[in-house]
C-alpha cells in the first residue's frame, strides 16, 4: 500500500496514514488532525465511513482527517492502545487532545466529536 | 488478475466472520475429490483495498464486506444470491438442481428468488452466531438476539461485558487472524 495513499473510492476525502507516514502526516502535522483507527472488516466502521467522509468534507478547510487501518498497522494500534474500532483520536500539533470510541454514525455527532477537543 | 491469469471464479469471504469461514470451508470440502481439481478459488477479503482492486478495478473493499462477491474470469462480479447460485453450479453435490435458477416465468425467476431470500436471511442472522464483524443486527433479528442474550445472561450472570453500541472490541483471535497472510489457492 503506498504511503499516505488515497486508497479508497474516488472522491475520498479521508487519506490513509501508514506506519511510515504517520509521523510526517499526523505527529508533525500542523493544526487540528483527526485520525480514525479502523478496520475494513468492522461493520461499525462501514456504517461510520460515509458519515466521516461527509464530516471530513465539512471541516476540510480547518481540520485534516486520516484513517489508520489497524489490520495492517498493528504497531500504531498498540502505541495508541486501540481496544476496538472505530476509535477517533484527535491530535493538535502532534499531541493527543481527544479520543472517542464508537461514535454514533450521525453527522452532527461525529462533527461534534472531532471538533470539540480543539475548541477548549 | 481477472484479465489473463484468472481462469476460475474467485469467492471472496469475510475472514473475520465465523459463519462465512464455515461456509468457505464447506465449499472447499464439497469440491474435494472432484475430477479436474477445484473450480473456485476462495480468498479472504483481507485489509488491503488496493489488492482487491487489482482483482477487479470496480471492486470496493467496503462493498466486499457488505455482500458476498464472486469474481468471474470474464471480469464481471456476481453478488449476493447470484453469487451463491453460481457457487452451487460449481459444486458436484449441488449442480444437478442449479438449472432451476435460470427457470423464468415472465421474467421472474422463482428459484433464484428463493436463493436470494435465503442469502439475505443468512446474512442477517450471522450476528446470532457470534460474528465479530457483522455489526448491528437487522431490526427483525434484534428481538431474537435480545432473547438469546437474556437466556445467556440467565445462565452466566455477570459475565456480560459492557460495550459501546457502535464499537467492535478487538479480540485476541481477531487480531491474530488479521495478521495472517492472504493465501489464495
Image (cartoon, coloured by chain):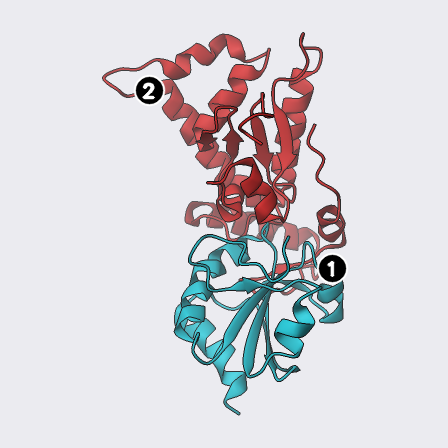
Q: Chain of mark 1?
A: A
Pinpoint residue A17: horizontal percent, then vertical percent: 62, 64
Q: Which residue is mark 2?
A: B109
Residue depth check, mark 2 versus mark 1: number of the one nearer the observer = 1
The quarter of the picture where the N terminus of chain B appears is top right
- Residue B155 drawn at (x, y percent): 69, 51
Q: Which quadrant of the view contains residue B11?
A: top right
Relative to B28, say whether B59 is above or below: below
**Whether residue B165 is visible:** no
- Residue A8 in the image: above or below residue B75: below
What residue do we see at 76% from left, 63% from top? A75
Quarter of the image where the C terminus of chain B is located: top right
Determine the residue positioned at 49% across, 41% down. Answer: B59
Left or right, A11 with reference to B146: left
Secondary structure found at label 1: helix
**Residue A79 placed where, x, y %?**
75, 70
Q: Residue furthest left?
A: B106
Q: Which residue is mark 1?
A: A74
Give the color of chain A as drawn. cyan
Q: Residue furthest front?
A: B4
**What label sits on residue B137 in the rendered view?**
none
Element under label 2?
A: loop
- Mark 1: few/some/many CA within 10 Å (<14, 14-19, 20+): some
**Residue A117 point in image, percent of width and height:** 54, 84
Q: Dot 2, crowdedness within 10 Å: few (<14), some or many (≥20)?
A: some
* Front residue of B15 and B122: B15
- Could you tell me which residue is drawn at 72 percent across and 55 percent down? B171
Q: Is residue A107 visible?
A: yes
Q: Disc 2 is attached to a residue of which chain?
A: B
Amino acid at each position: 500500500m503506498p504511503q499516505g495513499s488515497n486508497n479508497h473510492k474516488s472522491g475520498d476525502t479521508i487519506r490513509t496514514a501508514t506506519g511510515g507516514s504517520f509521523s510526517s502526516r499526523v505527529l508533525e502535522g500542523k493544526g487540528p488532525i483527526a485520525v480514525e483507527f479502523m478496520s475494513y472488516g468492522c461493520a461499525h466502521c462501514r456504517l461510520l465511513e460515509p458519515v466521516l467522509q461527509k464530516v471530513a468534507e465539512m471541516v476540510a478547510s480547518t481540520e485534516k482527517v486520516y484513517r489508520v487501518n489497524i489490520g495492517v498497522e498493528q504497531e500504531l494500534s498498540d502505541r495508541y492502545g486501540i481496544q476496538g474500532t472505530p476509535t477517533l483520536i484527535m491530535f493538535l500539533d502532534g499531541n493527543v487532545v481527544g479520543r472517542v470510541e464508537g461514535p454514533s454514525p450521525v453527522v452532527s455527532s461525529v462533527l461534534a466529536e472531532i471538533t470539540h477537543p480543539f475548541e477548549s | 488478475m481477472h484479465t489473463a491469469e484468472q481462469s476460475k471464479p474467485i469467492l471472496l469471504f469475510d475472514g473475520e466472520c465465523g459463519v462465512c469461514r464455515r461456509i468457505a470451508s464447506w465449499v472447499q470440502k464439497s469440491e474435494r475429490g472432484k475430477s479436474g481439481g477445484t473450480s473456485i478459488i476462495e480468498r479472504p477479503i483481507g485489509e488491503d483495498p488496493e489488492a482487491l482492486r487489482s482483482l477487479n478495478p470496480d471492486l470496493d473493499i467496503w462493498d466486499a464486506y457488505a455482500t458476498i462477491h464472486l469474481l468471474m474470469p470474464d471480469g464481471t462480479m456476481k453478488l449476493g444470491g447470484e453469487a451463491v447460485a453460481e457457487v452451487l453450479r460449481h459444486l458436484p453435490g449441488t449442480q444437478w438442481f442449479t438449472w432451476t435458477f435460470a427457470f423464468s416465468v415472465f421474467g421472474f425467476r422463482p428459484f433464484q428468488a428463493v436463493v436470494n431470500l435465503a442469502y439475505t436471511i443468512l446474512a442477517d442472522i450471522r450476528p446470532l452466531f457470534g460474528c465479530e464483524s457483522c455489526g448491528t443486527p437487522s431490526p427483525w433479528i434484534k428481538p431474537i438476539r435480545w432473547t438469546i442474550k437474556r437466556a445467556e445472561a440467565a445462565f452466566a450472570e455477570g459475565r456480560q461485558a459492557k460495550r459501546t453500541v457502535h464499537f467492535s472490541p478487538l479480540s485476541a483471535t481477531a487480531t491474530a487472524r488479521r495478521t495472517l497472510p492472504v493465501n489464495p489457492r
